[in-house]
Image: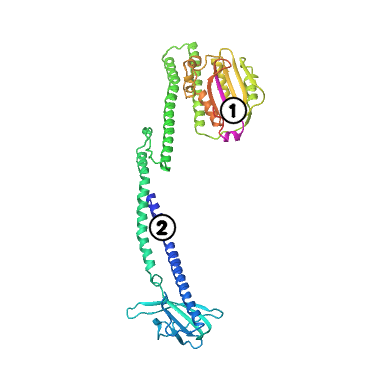
Amino acid sequence: MRPRSIRAQVTFGAVVVMVLILGLDLSLTTFLIRGAIVTQVRDMVAAEAREVSDHITSERYPGPIPDDGPVLRFQVVARGTGEVLASSSALEGAPRLTPERPEAGDSWMDTTVCRPAGDTGSRLCLLVVGHAVDDTAYGDVLVLAAVMMPPIVVTHTLEATLLGMSCVLIPAIGLVIWYGVGRALRPVEKISARLDNLSARELHMRLPVPRSQDEIAHLARTANAGLERLEEAVTRQRRFVSDASHELRNPIAGMRTKLEVELSDPDPDPRMRELLLTSLLSDTERLENIVNDLLELARLDTGTSRKRERVDLSALVEEEFVDKRGHPELRLHSSGPVHAEIGRLHAIRVLTNLIANAQRHAGSRVDVIVRHEGDCAVVEVHDDGTGIPAGERERIFERFARLPESKERDPHGSGLGLPISREIARGYGGSLVAGHSELLGGAAFVLRVPESPEAADEGGCPG
């Protein structure tokens, strides 16, 4: 069964990997250590056998072969008959150590000989090295030298020691990892507990950020930033719903009152009825405009993909606002074509909102400047009105926000034109900001839109 918690998964995975590593390390260590020991012992025995071979090339031993070195067992065996011609004291009267001989063309051989050691049931293992020598004082002989194999090689002591250390090390490592992962994930438990208590009414709550500068702390900070944006969006949505309800309630209440008054009159005047119908039609148009603006904002908020076109903004202003002669106070300043990646209908709507807003507040003149700025197309709309106070230049882009002068000049406005224009600009990677007109002294609105899709992908045109 796979562990469910991250703590158990990490600990289980680490222990499994550690078991595999230690198992492989145990096998390799045992093999390499044994191989190194056997090689070292074999070289030592071969050196002793060579000394005996060098001695008998000139003379025989008068007695037993001296065994005052590390090797205590020597035999000189006739190669033809296998007879033991000389031996050390430890092998005096003993039969030949091994019947094996060097292979053809080779003068050296080695083997391991094991035999019971007494009645204890244990075994005595000897490493035997043989050296074939011709024309010695004994004739053609085979010099055998033997030494007891180290216990670490012939027993399982090494494996048992390493296995015992592994059995202690693996649980210890598992406990350390279990404790360490649990300590590292402790902030996650606090974050999870806080999220369990989070609701739409408590979006002001924030997740605890651990002191460690690790990934969990980064996750907590990122989540808090997301909660802050969510709280801001919900607050804006609530304010929008409240403002929309208020804006819709006023014309509806006015229409209801007018209808009730008209219905309560037993002898209505035809002239008054005509005025009433005209007023109701005006209220209906205002309601229709508000609903259309709300629908447009809803579409913009959903982030629906917008159709991009290559639009010449200079030509668009010329065609829609200058050539039609509907704006005699409008003056266009442009040095030539200025293209932008924006939907034509959306561009017309934004420019209509900006120019209509400028005309409502202008004294006698509105100037539109169309120019390039880096990879952005820029449209500036200036008027010679009273301007916008510095502290109100961002608030006018809030939905249903209207300054006193705006309410006075356009009582039936909804306060959605500028917010819709900014959302359209942002949707195409652009921006829309308000400021002071150095040209005419009134208000100035600056629209920036990317000139190409590459410019939009590289960050757009921030204000």
Q: Residue at x 44, y 85 (%)?
A: 62
> Is 126 left, or right, of 348 in this rendering?
left
Asked where in the image residue 117 lies, by quadrant, the reply is bottom left
Query: At label 1, which amino acid type do we have?
Result: Leu
> Pointer 2: what residue?
18
- Circle count: 2
Of residues 162 and 237, the one nearer the viewer is: 162
Of residues 323 and 311, the one nearer the viewer is: 311
Percent position of residue 438, x then y? 57, 17
Query: At label 2, which amino acid type do we have?
Result: Met
Magenta-span inclusion, residue 134 = no
- State the CA–CA distance, disc 1 to disc 2: 66 Å
> Is 110 left, or right, of 331 in this rendering?
left
Query: Which image quarter is the N terminus in?
Result: bottom left
Percent position of residue 304, x then y? 53, 34
Can residue 98 be seen here? The reply is: no
Query: Which image quarter is the C terminus in?
Result: top right
> Pointer 1: what residue?
345
Can residue 258 be seen here? The reply is: yes
Q: Which residues are magenta?
A: 444-458
Asked where in the image residue 151 lies, by quadrant, the reply is bottom left
| Element carrying mark 2 | helix
| Element carrying mark 1 | helix
Residue 265 lies, with reference to residue 343, above or below; the image says above
